[in-house]
Amino acid sequence: MPPLSTLKYHSIAEAQMLPRLVRLAPNLYGAVFTLMKLVPAEYILRRAIERGELEDDAVIVETTSGTFGLALAMQAALMERELILVSDPAIDDNMHRRLADLGAKVEMCLEPAPVGGYQGARLQRLAEIRASLPSTYCPEQYSNPDNPRSYALVAEQLHRTLGTVDCLIGTVGTAGSMVGTVRGLREYSPDTVAVGVDSHRSVLFGQPDGPRTLRGLGNSLWPPNLDHSVFDEIHWCSAAEAFAQTRALHAQHALFQGPTSGAAHLVAQWYAAKHPDQLCVVMLPDEGYRYQATVYDDKWLAAEGYQLAERPTEPHTVASPAAAGDLWTRLVWGRRSYEEVPGVVPRTRQDAPERALS
């Protein structure tokens, strides 16, 4: 019989904030989140109130394509605060209805911007909304340093429960979770290895921007919270590989997660097997409920041309992002800055999102 929990919580957001740690291999644990973005959402809003930045009459506004918006909507409902979210077609009808039920107003950007894709269009609309209201507060998940700082709590949980974590594997989007958790773990062990997982045609680690089927990781803009020097390795994987591994994660471990988790587990499973002497943790940030009609539907997969057998056993290692191709690829980043890595796409001011308050 498993041990009974005697913990009591003030809210469901508090109860769901930290991950369950599930053993997936002899030296690999999954940090399984119900909704990982509850961590930064709660911390950012609490610190904003403490600093006097979130005033009593202010409307909370933010740009999001999904889970950060849901986390904000949960927090805003519990705080009885008004919330406006700017999103895009990545939010499905079920998510849209849930946000509305929590009291959030959702504004949709139906066309991508010429530069920055949907993220760029959302940021522009967000600036317009802020200019039209007398008092607003924007969490600014892309640039707010409280985003990565919030994950010190996750690092503390991992260290207290597992001891020294030799390697952390996770996807990168706004960069808060990996940058913040790795920084926290290195307070206990400076040698902790950070393995980031990105999608092809994401600008985060040196590839040119382009269309991406795999959402929840990668970015069309470079978030200021991304500290490239944190990372030891970067892996790029395809949507087909992530979808297949998502289904394998469910079939083999009964973990009903989304494709972001599948992408992370694809890399983590390989890394842990290659380094049996290291204790590894993989961040699994999203549940699978949003994907029941897509990733978990064999008919949808077949219609889109995806095969569940498309799971390579190891990545192809390259020396430059320019050589990454379209399948699972690995680059030894070596804690270098962006400019120190050969073959990255040169960045301009347009690569980084403007602060949402501008």
Image (cartoon, rainbow, N blue to C red):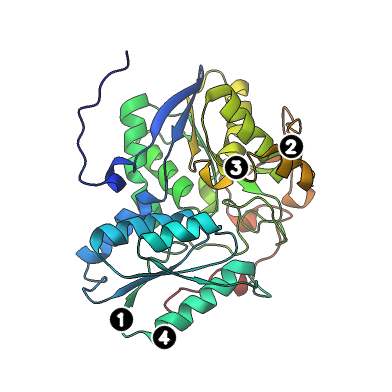
Q: Residues within 10 Å of mark 2 (few under 14, many from 20)?
A: some
Q: Residues within 10 Å of mark 3 (few under 14, many from 20)?
A: many
Q: Amino acid at mark 1?
A: Ser
Q: Which residue is mark 3?
A: 259
Q: Quadrant of the N terminus?
A: top left
Q: Which residue is mark 2?
A: 317
Q: Amino acid at mark 4?
A: Ala
Q: Which residue is mark 1?
A: 135
Secondary structure of the residue carrying numbered label 1:
loop
Q: Is residue 272 above or below residue 89?
A: above
User: Does residue 329 appear anywhere in the picture?
Assistant: yes
Q: Amino acid at mark 2?
A: Thr
Work out whether mark 1 precedes mark 2 in sequence or the reverse, and give the earlier one.
1
- C-alpha gap between disc 4 and disc 2: 47 Å
- C-alpha gap between disc 1 and disc 3: 37 Å
Q: Residue 131, which numbered label?
A: 4
**On the image, which quarter does residue 120 sit in?**
bottom right
Of labels 1 and 2, the one closer to you: 1
Q: Residues within 10 Å of mark 1 (few under 14, many from 20)?
A: some
